[in-house]
Image (spheres, rainbow, N blue to C red):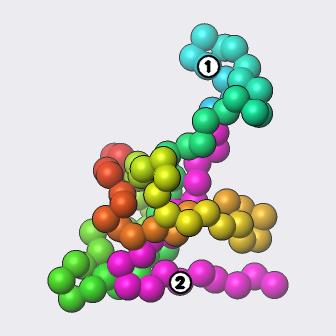
Amino acid sequence: MNSKITPLSDRVLIKVSEAETKTASGIIIPDNAQEKPQKGTVVAAGKGTKDNPITVKVGDTVLYGKFSGTELKHDGEEFIIMREADIFAIIS
């Protein structure tokens, strides 16, 4: 079953980026020591509200807070759904 998730109102669905598995110097980081990524790609966005239109768009890479949103798994992939206000920045 291949269902689609459509966020409502001012919510945004973000595909979580992969955790870093290696440091810049080449040291491999074990699974239990990897930090939860705080970066991802917008895959869907709601229509916003009358007072707060959505400013991010599908395909934007964004930074968000460590404890922002609600994590979910769908079709074997990890996503976070959160309010657009919880997004700190768009990376270009």
SS under mark 1: loop
Residue 78 image position (x, y, % from top left)? 67, 60
Q: Residue at x 31, y 82 (%)?
A: 48
Name the amino acid, label 1. Answer: Thr
Q: Residue at x 66, y 14 (%)?
A: 26
Along the line of sight, the residue nearer the viewer: 56 or 71: 71
Q: Quadrant of residue 30?
A: top right
| Disc on res. 91 | none
Total marks in image: 2
Q: Residue furthest front?
A: 67
Q: Is residue 40 visible?
A: yes
SS under mark 2: loop
Left or right relative to 21: residue 82: left
Q: Residue at x 58, y 54 (%)?
A: 16
Q: Residue furthest right?
A: 1
Question: In the image, which residues are magenta?
Answer: 1-19
Q: Quadrant of residue 50?
A: bottom left
**Looking at the image, is 24 positioned above or below residue 20?**
above
- First along the sequence among labels 1 and 2: 2
Q: Residue furthest bottom?
A: 50
Q: Residue at x 18, y 83 (%)?
A: 51
Q: Residues within 10 Å of mark 2 (few under 14, many from 20)?
A: some
| Disc on res. 23 | 1
| Disc on res. 6 | 2
Left or right relative to 65: residue 52: left
Q: Residue furthest top?
A: 25
Residue 67 in magenta?
no
Left or right relative to 18: residue 60: left
Residue 17 image position (x, y, % from top left)? 58, 48
